[in-house]
Amino acid sequence: RQQVVVFRPPLPGANDYIKRVIAVPGDNLEIKRGAVWINGRVLPEPYVSMPMNANETYPYQSVTIPPGHYFVMGDNRGNSYDSRYWGFVPRENIIGTPMFIYMSVEATEEAWQPGHIQERFLAYANAVVRPHLVRWKRLFTAP
């Protein structure tokens, strides 16, 4: 639990995702008032960079994680397409864990898709021109 993983999301044609494991098989997960509850206790999450909307509802308000599956969420909760929306990640879809963060910049989702070299270049160029958009404290740290 709380390990960052690289995985193939259960979405047709999607590229690999990087998210944090929030709940493991057998856990009871609840999302209420903008907080994650695991087995009846609030999950401490100092890594969250943007909180969830406390009033938003999700299909997974209270659920037990099925065997062989994981519930994952992004650290940028207010802007993360994750298990809250598309469900559990099967164990066989998990590829591994990242070693360190080598860059953390603001960019469109499209910039990281294959064939979008110009958008990716613009994201990095924007970071050079506007260095305040780089999340410097995250660089070369373990996820």
Image (cartoon, grey):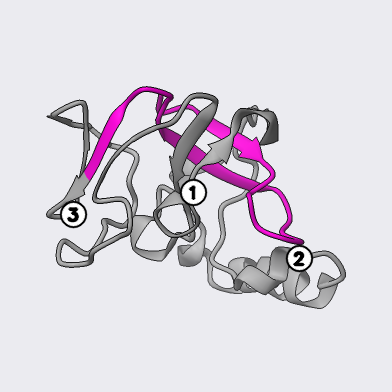
Q: Position of residue 106 (x, y in %)?
A: 54, 66
In the rendering, which numbered label is found on residue 113? Answer: 2
Q: Which residues are magenta?
A: 1-30
Q: Which label's residue is closer to the chain start, 3 or 1?
A: 3
Is residue 122 positioned above or below 30 on the image? below
Look at the image and say whether residue 94 sits in the magenta stretch.
no
Q: 140 or 47, which lies in front? A: 47
Which image quadrant: the N terminus?
Answer: top left
Can you identify the residue that label 1 sits on? Answer: 136
Q: 80 or 131, which lies in front? A: 80
Is residue 16 positioned above or below 99 on the image? below
SS category of the residue bearing label 1: helix
Q: Which label's residue is closer to the chain start, 1 or 2?
A: 2
Give the residue furthest to the right: 115
Find out whether the residues at labels 3 and 1 contact each other: C-beta distance under 8 Å: no
SS category of the residue bearing label 2: loop
Residue depicted at x 74% and y 76%: 119
In the rendering, which numbered label is found on residue 34? Answer: 3
* Residue type of the residue flagged with mark 2: Gln
Q: Position of residue 132 (x, y in %)?
A: 46, 65
Q: CA distance from mark 1 to mark 2?
A: 23 Å
Residue depicted at x 63% and y 67%: 128
Q: Which label's residue is closer to the chain start, 3 or 2?
A: 3
The quadrant where residue 80 appears: bottom left
* Residue type of the residue flagged with mark 1: Trp
SS category of the residue bearing label 3: loop
Look at the image and say whether residue 2 sits in the magenta stretch.
yes
Residue depicted at x 68% and y 36%: 93
